[in-house]
Structures are given as structure tokens and as C-alpha cells.
Amino acid sequence: MAELASLRSLLGADNVLTGEAMAPFLTDWRERYSGEAEAVVRPDSTEEVAKVVQWCVEHGFSIVPQGGNTGLCGGATPDHRGRQIVLSLTRLNRIRHVDTDNDTMIVEAGCILQNVQEAAKQVGRLFPLSLAAEGSCTIGGNLATNAGGTQVLRYGNTRELCLGVEVVCADGQIWHGLRGLRKDNTGYDLRDLFIGSEGTLGIITAASLKLYPLPVAQCTAMLTLASLEDAVKMLSLARAGFGASLTGFEVMRNNCLDGVIRCYPEQRLPFDEEGSQSPWFALLELSDNESEAHARERFEVVLSDAIDAGIVQDAVIAESVAQSKALWHLRESIPLSEKSFGKSVKHDVSIPVSSIPAFVEKTNAMLQQQFPGVEHVIFGHLGDGNLHYNVARGTAYSEDELLSKQQAIYELVHGSVHAFHGSISAEHGIGQLKRDLLPHYKDPVELALMQKIKQALDPNGVMNPGKVLQER
């Protein structure tokens, strides 16, 4: 296409991909969405991103920003109209500055999360965002979806870990908002508009992130539980006993870990045969600023009380870093093992913690009544009320049969979430997957305000159209 010649002159021919070279960028990680694009471009700087945006405005193209392409809602996948440019940010992968006195780090959007964690560790600091996809997801994508992960209980979502952003706006202007301030009350908080907007308002190209002291010791334990009610009771005990030192509290239904072991036979549950059949498991992590002995002593006291009270059936405390990693590896392998057994109907929901047992019991029963034989694959971050409530085909349905019922399953589950005063998206975003569901569960005034913000910041619809909000 002749129009692309000027784009190649801006970025270099090797950084404007067309034809078969675009294939890895056109399908999402779950292989649920595929689209078409005129080209995939790979800018090397914020200034080059701005030039791409200006080019798209001039030539009538829209832009789909993409980081590690690990999203779960189709937010980084182009549509089928062919008038879009996929803008890959993976070459913007520099760590620009680390300030240990201010405990901040300025990184570009294409930095892989694990690399940011390691860079912080090298200067004796912690960047606490931790996800199963941390070896391939990027900071830009984490910010675009306001990602959560396993340590939200202590440190908050990505939004809470970011002090400032650099953004290329929909007209190609650059907002230099990389502040490292904890306090800045000088008007509207534009940073929070762009975080979680999934690239629909502008393109985040860099961020100023918060760092924390490295904990002196971390202690990890896996527990067996008879019920979700006991898991909630254990969470209350852990909060009272550990306070802010409690950094993780994950819950997993038995079939989740059974799937991991079937998929990855080298992994093992640390319990005997009876314990391995427990209905529910919890994974706790405690970060201590005194000593490993102090952390373990606190863990043993709280867990002993929980066992004596009949809340916990059994507990295994990791004796080494390797054992701790093995326990976390079991939890983090759940999404990959689930994918290996075929597509499921996924739900990323948040519910008030106190209501989670009732929500699961009621929703499971309604699903079995309407879709007998489906399998409930339930795991997530109990500490912050976030469940990955997934519905798998089990032995009752083929993959195609299950997916043909997807819309009805969504309506049932999301209706139940709404009835329990929850949210249909806790940490994965909206993307394409939940765009058309949003009007059914969002306050009409709130949705109208979102439309007005979109119109004000992106009047020409250049930024990731068809994601989050329905096109007008």
C-alpha cells in the first residue's frame, strides 16, 4: 500500500510489518479473537509513537496498542475492517531511571514485568506486582488493564503502584506526566484516567513506579480446607494475626490443582493422599521485616490456632525458597493447565469477601440446573475478593457445545455477580469480551460520563475503537 511508504520512512522498513509477519500480533493469547490490520508497527521511542499517531490521524487509520499480547479479553486484538494499525510497544523496553532515595523507578511501557521486578531487586527494592504471565506481560499492558495479581491484598492493583505516566494523546501530543510525587493535588488526576482505559484514551509509553523495601524474610504455607466458609474465616484470622505483613491469600478448588498435576506430572501436592483430596486449598504468604525465625514463629502460632479451631485441616509451611516457589508454581500453573484441557467460559469477578461462599454455592447450583454436568473451575485472590470463576465442559459437553452456551452462561454468572453487589471485571479489563455486557451492569450515569470522556479525549475514534465502550 502506497500510504505505508511514509510510515516506513518514519520507523524504518524493518519496523513496519505486513503480510505473514503480522500473524503473531493478530490473535489474542486465548485464541478467541483474531483480526486484520494494515500493518504492525514497532516504534523505538515515545517520539516515534507520537509520529505514528499523527500518521494514523492524517491517513484515517485507528490504532490498537499491544504489549506482550497476554490479555484475556481481546483488548489488544484488531477488528476485521482492516483499517487499523497494531502498535507494538515491545521495543520501548528501557529502564530510564531508578531513585532509591525516593523509592521510584521510571520504566518504558514495553518492559517485561519480570525484568522490572529483577531491576528493583538489584538495588535492594521490591516492585510487588506479580502475575502468572509476568515473564511475558509488559508494564504498559499492566497499566492499561490496571492488572491485579497475587499481592493486591498488601500493595494494591497496578494503579496504586504508579505515581505518574507519560502518554501519547489521540492527536499525537505527548503528556509528560512522569512525576515521582506521593502528594500532588493540582487538579484532576489524569493519570488515573489513562490507567485501566485499555488504550482507548491514549497510549501509555512510560511510567513512574513505586518501589518498596525488600522484605527480610518471606514465609509461604499451603492449607487444606473443608469449605469456602472456612477459607473466609482463615482470612480473618490471618489479617488479625499478620496485619500488613500478609501479602498473599489465594484460594483454589480441588479440581484446579488436580488439573495442574495431570498436565504437569512433575509437580506434586505437599500432602498425603487424604489431604490431596481436600475440597479447597489456600496459599498464604507472609512478608516479614525482622527475621525468618520471626516470620515462621508468627505463621506457626496463627496456623496452630486455626487447626485447633477446626478451620484448617492441614498445613504445610515451606522450609526453603525452593519449596516456596514450588507452592506458588502450583497456583500459577492453573491458567496454563486449564487452557491445555480446552476452552472454557471464563469470568474474572469481584465479590465482597463475606459473600463469596454464598455466591459460589448459589451460582454453582444455578449452573448445574441449567447446564447439567459443567465443571466449576474456581480459584483466585480471596484476600481482595477476586475470583476466577470459570465454567469448563467437563465430560458432559464438547468444546463447541460449551462455547455455544457461552452467552447464556455469561448472563447467569454475571447476573449472580450483580445480585451479590459485585463487579463483572476485577482485574482483566473489558476489551471486546465484556464490552456489550457493560451497559447491563454499569450505572447509566457512570457509563454516560465514560462516553463523554472518550469523546473529549479521542473525538476521532483513533484509540482502540470497539474496546471497553460500544462505538457510536
Image (cartoon, rainbow, N blue to C red):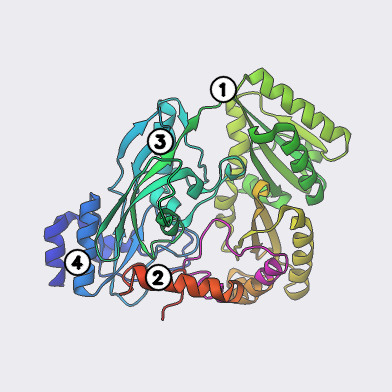
- Residue 55: numbered disc: 4
Q: Which residue does the image show at 78% across and 56% down from the upper left?
A: 357
Residue 266 visible in image = no
- Residue 206 vertical placement versus 377 (above, below): above
The amino acid pointed to by label 1 is Val
347 or 400, nearer to the observer: 347
- Residue 454: numbered disc: 2
Write down the residue under mark 1: 216
- Residue 102 vertical placement versus 41 (above, below): above
Q: Earlier in the sequence, mark 1 or mark 3?
A: 3
Q: In the image, residue 397 lies at what x, y percent? A: 66, 70
The amino acid pointed to by label 3 is Thr
What kind of element bears circle 2? helix
Q: Residue furthest front?
A: 186
User: Contact (CB < 8 A) between labels 1 and 3?
Assistant: no
The amino acid pointed to by label 4 is Trp
